[in-house]
Amino acid sequence: MSTTPSKELGSFPNPRPGRSYEIFFECPEFTCLCPMTGQPDFATFRIRYVPDERCVELKSLKLYLWSFRDEGHFHEAVTNRILDDLVTLLAPRRLEVEGDFMVRGGIRTVVTARHES
């Protein structure tokens, strides 16, 4: 598997599809660029989901999140994009993505996007 940033997310079969259980990831090293100024934005992303038939593969998730670092994105847009891409890949029972962005201009932004099937 590659070690370069990629928009390609991978998955594997849920080992317990008959059981409802939650998976939680915390990704404290997310970066992208402000689309207005080009300055870096730093965030912690928290991803919480209840899988159905598929689970996200962690290395692909890491490389996927890394792929945003040189791109300009509004906080709201990138949080919803990550949710949409994970929902498309996994078709989970429930999924929540929280983007907790560091203070910029005296304002801290937290964006939470949710999906329920």
Image (cartoon, rainbow, N blue to C red):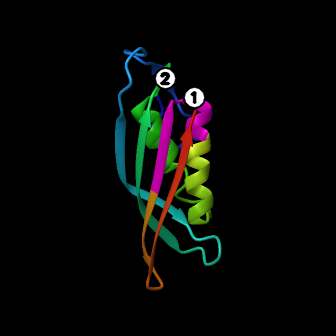
Residue 25: percent from left, percent from top: 36, 43
Q: Is the residue 89 above or below the residue 17 in the image?
A: below
Name which of mark 2 and mark 1 comes first in the sequence: 2
Comparing 85 with 33, the one in front is 85
> In the picture, residue 30 is in which quadrant?
bottom left
Density class for disc 2 (Cα within 10 Å; few <14, some 14-19, many ≥20) is many
Amino acid type, residue under disc 1 in the picture:
Ala
The residue to which callout 1 is attached is 91
For the point 42% across and 18% down, which residue is it? 14
Residue 117: percent from left, percent from top: 58, 32
Amino acid type, residue under disc 2 in the picture:
Asp
> In the picture, residue 89 is in which quadrant?
top right
For the point 45% across and 27% down, which residue is it? 51
Queried whether the magenta region covers residue 3, the answer comes back as no
For residue 78, say whether it is visible. Answer: yes
**Whether label 2 touches label 1, CB < 8 Å:** yes
Density class for disc 1 (Cα within 10 Å; few <14, some 14-19, many ≥20) is many
For the point 37% across and 15% down, which residue is it? 16
The residue to which callout 2 is attached is 52
For the point 54% across and 29% down, which residue is it? 90
Mark 1: which secondary structure?
A: loop
For residue 4, say whether it is visible. Answer: no
> In the picture, residue 71 is in which quadrant?
bottom right
Q: CA distance from mark 2 to mark 1?
A: 7 Å
**Would residue 3 be found to the left or right of residue 72 on screen?**
left
Which residue is the extreme one toward the bottom? Answer: 106
Comparing 114 with 11, the one in front is 114
What segment is highlighted magenta in the picture? 85-98
**Would residue 68 be found to the left or right of residue 18 on screen?**
right
Queried whether the magenta region covers residue 88, the answer comes back as yes
